[in-house]
Image (cartoon, coloured by chain):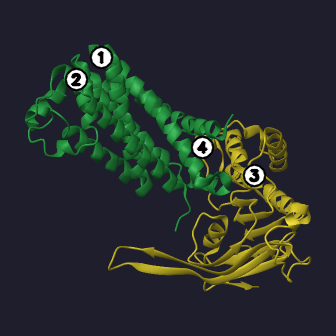
Chain colours: A green, B yellow
Amino acid sequence: MTTFATVGGNFVREQLRAPLTLVLLVAIPAFFVVIFAAVVGQFADALGGTLAGRSATAISAGWAASFLTGTLAFFQVASSRGADRRLAAAGLGPMHVAQARIGAALVLATTVSMAAFVSLWVRSGIDHPLHASLAIGGFAAIYIGVGALVGAVVTDPLEGSLLVMLVFALDAFSGPQMTSSGGLAALTPTRHAANLLIAAAGGEGSPAGDWVNVALVALGSLGVAFGAFWFAARRRS
Amino acid sequence: MSAILNTVAARGDERCSVPGHCVLRVEGLEKSFRGGIPPWRRQVEVLRGASLMVCSGELVGLVGENGSGKSTLMQIVVGLLARDAGTVDRPARLGYCPQAPMLWDKLTIDEHFALYARAYGLDDDERARSVGRLLDELRFAKYRGERVEKLSGGTRQKLNLALALMHEPQLLLLDEPYSGFDWETYLRFWEMSERRRDAGMGILIVSHFLTERERLDRVYELRNGQAVEA
């Protein structure tokens, strides 16, 4: 087994060994898709947006994936900072630690995305399942970067998790069809993924530009996450 | 142990019984920490030109008041902290046992050994041999499948120490390694350290107890940011 597989595998195990985390991996997507989606239209209406029906259900699956992935990525850094640094200093190096962490984050993001996708499928059916699954994966990949970045710069678990929550709330409630003004919507990291997901839920395809934009933002976010994982494991000044 | 003889210093030191046996040389180490936000930013100088050396086959103590910079010096030598000034010559094969165990709560003892075997570049046979020996020496084999979060403080500390020893380092840095040990384990710890010292390992240990002085070959005291041989 390679170093990447051994170290990354243990990092995944570390996250999944909390029984509550396992429960939440199923419960949060179900809550978002089944319960939250039912009222999100009223939120959108109050904010001047048009989000409703199947679009609201679909986008809730993306939000579930992003919320869970961001939180898991944050705690990957926050709960293991000292241990990762010691392992890096023992000879593994911050680069290999960061590679294993990003690998573990991608495995967790895939698991979370699948849970969100299944919740969505069970709840409302999906006309474009491949598009929807890729869009949900895009949400998750983007929030690996958000969670890891917050974890690298904020050491306190409470402050950090609140900050991830704040970013998520701003992103979710300023996204496409949620507001009338569109001001913040043009800046939210998941807006392209949200457009894809809304289109997929309605059985429509999306323009190539949206796919390219999601890919670019997701790759950029993974790059940020890699830097954050490296930063957390490096020698301190 | 012949590898130990060719470690840090082609620049052998006259203080070592055999020239060229120096495994750690720290010279003029300076470190300060900055805190707060401008204009209230303040700077605390912890190390002000600290120098010390450890030879192979030597058990050296590092003492000092709380906050004197002992752990900071250790972390700089290990590579966890950057230094402001000074030089550190140390071997690549180094073991470090931090004061507070830096472990993953959800992983088992065996999984920790697997991760550190990767970091140290040990193959499966070397790892099995080394882990078996350490589990016997420290007598915690029955917990090897347990997660760290379920272990007592003393057993965590045993794992903390074992991780520093599993690759038979040329230089071993121990930062109060016995907190949480019962008396029997504490005595066994010193036996293990002395055995390794006699086999040629250089050991630097942060210690608080005057009663341990007789076990140490030399003692440095950190005072006002400088290491003074006591």
Q: Nearer the viewer, residue A64 or B87?
A: B87
Marks 4 and 3: which is nearer the front? 3
Label 3: which secondary element: helix
Earlier residue among tags 4 and 3: 4
Q: Chain of mark 4?
A: B
Residue type highlighted by circle 1: His
Label 2: which secondary element: helix
Residue B162's label in the rendered image is 3
Residue A22 at x, y percent in the picture? 47, 29
Which residue is at 27% across, 29% downward? A208
Residue type highlighted by circle 4: Glu
Q: Are marks 3 and 2 on the same chain?
A: no
Residue A100 at x, y percent in the picture? 56, 42
The CA distance from mark 1 to mark 4 is 44 Å
Residue A199's label in the rendered image is 2
Q: Are marks 1 and 3 on the same chain?
A: no
The CA distance from mark 4 to mark 2 is 46 Å
Residue type highlighted by circle 3: Ala
Discs 4, 2 touching: Cβ within 8 Å: no
Label 4: which secondary element: helix
Which residue is at 62% across, 53% downward? A93
Q: Are marks 4 and 3 on the same chain?
A: yes
Q: Which residue is mark 1?
A: A128
Q: Which residue is mark 4?
A: B149
Marks 1 and 3: which is nearer the front? 1
Discs 1, 2 touching: Cβ within 8 Å: yes
Which residue is at 60% across, 35% downward? A9
Residue found at the very far front of the displayed protein: A208
